[in-house]
Image (cartoon, rainbow, N blue to C red):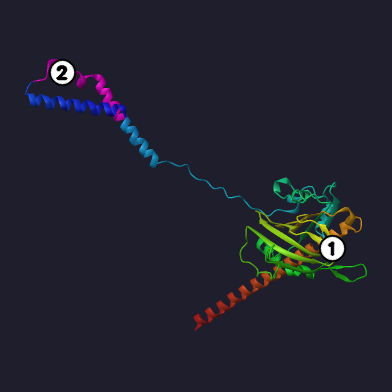
Amino acid sequence: MNLSRISVSMGILFLLLVFISSLTAQPLAEDEALLLEEFISDESAILFEESVLAEDQNLIQDFDDYFVFVAPELVFEVPSFETRSLDDIFPGITRNHRRMVLSATGLRHSFEKDGTPVLIPNPDTGIDLISDVMRKNPSHIIEALVIVPYNERELDMLDIYNALGRIENIKDQTLLLRNGNTFNVFKETTRVTSPQNRRAVPDPAPSATLPFSETMYLRFTDSFIGDIYIRGDMSLSLYGLTYNMTNFRDVHFAIFRIMRAERVSINIYLEPVKEGVLIYSMSGIYLPGFIVNRMNVPALINNRVSVLMNWITEGLRIQESVEIERDIDILRNNIFQNNNLNRLLNN
């Protein structure tokens, strides 16, 4: 900018000298002419012009660079997806535990807060249910693992999501007592509108799309305890679905509060694996000492986990039947349409 101002000033001076000389009709003084000649012919003036031109070119180049740029090629790497196996998720599982997992009842293990689980997922799988359970400082924990084998077709995560949408069916699950009778652990299981509005609402129709996350509010009427209000948070990952459930209200037995809000932790992870649908659960509960001393807490928790496991298994079978019927209907409609087309062509 300083060089440009000098150039303009010298140009004005030159014009001024020419203008004065034309008015006076006298030649320039010898010293003035020599000064002007030296300015025009001096090498420094040439360098001056070159520097000004270079500055202008740099300005133009900077201007072009501002609008024109060469970006590197964008390469998107799509993560490869391959159905995992039981051994991929639980690489340290023993032969005996594996046999139990593949049985109808699955594997169960209960321990107190100072104990340790027998099921430890591979850290690379990203499955970590016990951390969420232990954050609530439970007094008793139970872990469970079962694989529901495929029958006539494989199930995907949308099938699993719809299978777990039938909350009203939980109450229909029964336990077999020693005397041969059956017992309903829950008298009622339903969705509610919100934590503030606890009005029962029906289950929605099966979904055609899989949400990334969802929160639901439930009311379980326990045959022993009474009403338990639960918040369920579903989250979707690359391989499976995780349901985290906790009580959003205090739990009372008769007139006594036996559990504060947010002290129940039921975590269920489901994934379609090579052997079937994997159902992995880690549940924790905190009960005060005067309650613990008066009941069999592990059996109390295990019975309710069993109901949930049986409900999920039944829901998967129902969903499998629904999808098979749907495939049959599609095939039947295609055959019907082809027959109609053949008739038209023959006529």
Location of residue 223 in the rendering, given as x and y in whole percent from the top left corner: 84, 67
Q: Is residue 188 left or right of residue 57?
A: right
- Residue at 75% in and 59% down: 249
Name the foreground residue: 39 vs 281. Answer: 39
Name the foreground residue: 6 vs 104. Answer: 6
- Identify the secondary structure beneath mark 2: helix
Q: Pointer 2 and pointer 1: residues touching (CB < 8 Å)?
A: no
Q: Residues within 10 Å of mark 2 (few under 14, many from 20)?
A: few
Q: Tag on residue 339?
A: none
Q: Looking at the picture, does residue 9 appear above or below residue 328?
A: above
Q: Residues within 10 Å of mark 1 (few under 14, many from 20)?
A: few
Queried whether the magenta region covers residue 40, the answer comes back as: yes
Residue 7 seen by the camera: yes
- Identify the secondary structure beneath mark 1: loop
- Which residue lies under the disc numbered 2? 32
Name the foreground residue: 240 vs 275. Answer: 240
- Residue at 62% in and 76% down: 332
Query: Does the magenta stretch mainly form a helix, a strand or a loop?
Result: helix
Disc 2 versus disc 1: distance between alpha carbons? 114 Å
Query: Which amino acid type is marked by label 1?
Result: Ile
The N terminus lies in quadrant = top left
Q: Tag on residue 255?
A: 1
Q: Which residues are magenta?
A: 27-54
Residue 152 seen by the camera: no
Q: Is residue 163 left or right of residue 6?
A: right
Location of residue 256 in the rendering, given as x and y in whole percent from the top left corner: 84, 60
Queried whether the magenta region covers residue 266, the answer comes back as: no
Location of residue 198 in the rendering, given as x and y in whole percent from the top left corner: 71, 66
